[in-house]
């Protein structure tokens, strides 16, 4: 069963996420694991191909040293593949891995921010423990009992996994009134909300961006000297932040 959760930003604006269900989350893990093993199989094939030739060229002590170095590098590569895979993708791909992207879900931190390196590392360090204890059985139980569908790693890192709707805000239409500030009636707090939205906008997922923009625009739009009906909420706030404040 899908659940939703309300999140409040630092500007006291609330929006809702649709939480990812257990089925989509575990299928994403399966896809990511399959990718990892495919990469591993390819690496082993390459190693076997070149390793046979290297054995013929290296003998005695040099062979033993070379073998130790290769074993150490292999262990490091395995660690990077099966541990660093999730950390790197979630940190640098806005909370997504290939499996999550295919299933239309992503990881976000409390407040709607994408995960940073610390939160991605924490949730995936705990992932190792969860995978070792009954292959995510404890994770499934925790997610079912948690109102926010959080597994142990999410609880430790302060993250949730949400659905990532595949829609984008329409690009701003040409604006004829760009030389008109039109925002003189806005209070300092309302101006601050618009600026804060513009600063935070790139880090918000599309659903959160649309919800926050609608909430702020409902307060700001009636006070403007022009209607700007041709701009949606996101485009209006972006325009105001760049041209009218």
Image: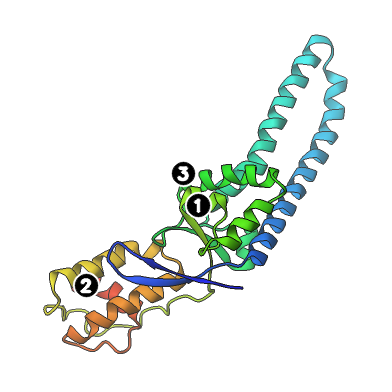
Q: CA distance from mark 1 to mark 3?
A: 14 Å
Element type at marker 3? helix
- Give the residue at x 53% y 56%: 93
Residue 84 pos. (x, y %)? 60, 42
Q: Nearer the viewer, residue 52 or 118?
A: 118
Question: Is residue 86 depicted above or below 59 in this figure?
Answer: below
Element type at marker 1? helix
- Give the residue at x 47% y 75%: 168
Instruction: Give the labeled residue for mark 2.
Output: 243
* Mark before the other along the chain sequence, 1 or 2: 1
- Give the residue at x 57% y 61%: 145
- Closer to viewer: mark 1 or mark 2: 1
Marks 1 and 3: CB-CB under 8 Å?
Answer: no
Element type at marker 2? helix
Instruction: Give the labeled residue for mark 3.
Output: 118
- Give the residue at x 39% y 76%: 211
- Closer to viewer: mark 3 or mark 2: 3
Question: Is residue 32 depicted above or below 47 in this figure?
Answer: below
Q: How many numbered marks appear?
A: 3
Q: How many residues crowd mark 1 within 10 Å: few (<14), some (14–19), many (20+)?
A: some
Question: Is residue 28 depicted above or below 119 in this figure?
Answer: below
In the picture as drawn, the residue positioned furthest to the top comes out as: 61
The disc at residue 155 is 1
Quick check: can you spot residue 245? no
Question: Is residue 69 depicted above or below 148 in this figure?
Answer: above
Quadrant for the N terminus in the image: bottom right
Quick check: can you spot residue 154? yes
Residue 163 pos. (x, y %)? 54, 69
Q: CA distance from mark 1 to mark 2?
A: 41 Å
């Amino acid at each position: 069963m899908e659940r939703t959760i309300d999140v409040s930003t630092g500007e006291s604006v609330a929006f809702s996420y649709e939480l990812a269900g257990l089925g989509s989350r575990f299928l994403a893990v399966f896809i990511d694991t399959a990718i990892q093993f495919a990469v591993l199989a390819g690496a082993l094939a390459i190693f076997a191909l070149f390793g046979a030739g290297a054995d013929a060229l290296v003998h005695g002590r040099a062979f033993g040293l070379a073998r130790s170095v290769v074993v150490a590098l292999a262990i490091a590569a395995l660690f990077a593949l099966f541990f660093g895979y999730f950390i790197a993708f979630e940190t640098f791909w806005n909370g997504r891995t290939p499996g999550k992207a295919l299933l239309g879900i992503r990881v976000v931190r409390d407040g709607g921010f994408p995960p940073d390196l610390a939160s991605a590392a924490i949730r995936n360090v705990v992932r190792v423990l969860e995978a070792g204890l009954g292959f995510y059985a404890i994770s499934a139980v925790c997610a079912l009992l948690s109102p926010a569908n959080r597994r142990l790693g999410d609880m430790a890192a302060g993250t949730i996994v949400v659905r990532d709707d595949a829609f984008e805000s329409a690009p701003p239409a040409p604006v004829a009134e760009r030389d008109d500030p039109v925002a003189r009636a806005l209070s300092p707090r309302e101006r601050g909300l618009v600026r804060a939205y513009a600063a935070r906008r790139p880090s918000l997922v599309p659903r959160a961006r649309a919800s926050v923009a609608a909430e702020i625009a409902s307060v700001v739009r009636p006070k403007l000297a022009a209607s700007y009906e041709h701009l949606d909420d996101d485009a209006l706030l972006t325009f105001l932040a760049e041209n009218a404040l």
